[in-house]
Image (tube, rainbow, N blue to C red):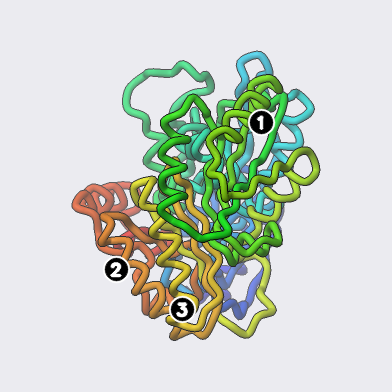
Amino acid sequence: MLVEEAFLQLQEQFPDVEMKYGKTDNYLGNSGLVRVYPSSEQQISAILKYANENGKTVSVEGNGTKRGFGGLTETADILVSLSRYKGIVEHTVGDMTVTVKSGTVFRELQGFLAKYNQQVSLDPSWPEDATIGGVIASNDSGPKRLGYGSARDAVIGLRVVYPDGSIIRTGGKVVKNVAGYDTNKLFIGSMGTIGIITEITLKLRPSPKAESLSLLSFPDANLKEIHSFVVDLLDSMIEPISLELLNPKLSKNLTGTEQYTLVVGFEDVKSSVDYQINKLKDLKPQNSELNILQDEELRAFWDRLSCMIPNGKRVSSSNQTEACVKIGVKNLDVVQVIRESDLLQDSFNLKVSAHGGLGHGICQVNLLGAQEDVALAISRLREVVESYHGYLIAKHLSLALRHKIDVWGDKPTYFFLFEGIKKKIDPNRVLNEKRFVGGI
C-alpha cells in the first residue's frame, strides 16, 4: 500500500488526530512521511495497531530534541509525536509521587511540582524542550547524577503501548514496591524500540532548602593537583550533589575564565550547605581560585550548562558539523578523558567543549568543525576511552555521520538478550527501527 493511501486511511480512521503528510528535509533523519499527533493513549494504541497490521514502520518522538540520537533511517512511514499528549495524571503529595503523561515538557513538570516544594530528581539537557518521556526513553541525566542518580532511580512505574497496540503496566505507583522483576528497566534507555511509554510514575524529593555552587579554577592546569584534590574531597565528609570538571573552552563559555574548573554543587538545609562550603575552603589547593554562586547566578549557570549540547528540535545556523558524545569511565579517569578531549582541538581543528563527573564517571563532549574532522576525532576519542575500559556513545550526529560512525560501539556480550526481547515484542520491527545498539 502506498504511503499516500495509508495517510488517507489514517485520516479516515482517526478524524480527531492531527496529522500532516509530506517528506521533510531533516539532516538528522528519524522523521516520518505521515506525522501524527495523538492526544490520548487510545489513539496511540490504535495507530500502532494499524501500523503493525499494515506493515508500516513507526518513528517516535516527544519534542524532537533527541532526533540526532541513534537511528539509520531518514524517514519512517509514520512519525508518532507525543508533543500533544501531556499533563499530570495523578500527584500524591503525601506519598511524594507523581504520574505524568510522557509528552509533558520536563520544565513544565518541575514548575508544577515546585508549588508543592517537590521536584523530580533529574537534570536532563534542554529541560524547556525535552519531554519526560524522551528523558526516560533515552535515560538522560546531567551533572547532578552524582547526588540524584539516573532515570532508573527515579521511575517507579510505567504504562507502555506495545507495537501490536496492547497496553501494559510495569512497576507500580508506590515507592515501596518489591513485587518481582523490575521490568521498568527494559524500557528506560531503550530508545523507544520495544514500546511507546505513555505514562510515567516518578518518586519525588523535597525541593532543597538551600543551594550553592562552588567554581574552583586551576590557573596552572595542573591535572595531578586536580586529581589529588578530588581524591581528598571524595574521602572527606562532604557530600556534593555534583562534582563536574569543565575543560577550559567550556569554562570560558560558562564562567568567563579559560581554565580547568571544578563545579561543586551542594543542596541541603542552609546549615549543612554552609558547613560543606567551609570544608571545601579548607581543602582547596592554595593556588586555586574559588568563586561561589547562589540564587539567580546559580540557576543561570545550570540553565546555560543544560543547553550546551546540540538540540535536534532547533536547527543549527552553523555551516559546520555539530556532534555530542557521551562517555563512561571510572570516575577518576574523567580527568584524563577531559584532557584528551582538549587535545582534539588542535589535532583536528575543532572547537571542543567537554565536562565530566568525577563522582560518577559520565562525560559529555561537544565537537564543532568540518564533518570529516569530527568523524576522525570521535574515532580517536573512542580509542582513548576504550583504553580506559570505558565506552563512548554518540548522542547527537547527523544522519550522514551515523552511517559512518557506529553510534553505540561494539555489541555487548549480552546483546543476544536485546535481540530476543526485540524479536518477542516487536517481531515485525515496527518501532524505531535501527535506533538502538546493534541495529535493533
Q: Find residue 374 and name its label.
A: 3
> What's the residue type where badge 2 is placed?
Glu
Check residue 383 in the rendering and tell me which mark sits there, or answer none. 2
Residue 317 appears left or right of 164: right
Residue at 54% in and 81% down: 369
- For marks 2 and 1, the one nearer the N-term is 1
Which label's residue is closer to the chain start, 1 or 3?
Answer: 1
The structure residue drawn at horizontal position 38% and vertical position 18%, both measured from the top left corner, is 178
Residue at the farthest top position = 94
At 39% from the left edge and 38% from the top edge, which residue is drawn?
185
Q: Residue type at mark 3?
A: Val
Task: Please state, as top left, top right, bottom left or bottom right, where the C terminus lies in the image.
Answer: bottom left
Q: Which residue is mark 1?
A: 119
The mark total stands at 3
Is residue 45 in sight in this rendering?
no
Q: Is residue 393 visible?
A: yes
Q: Secondary structure at mark 3?
A: helix
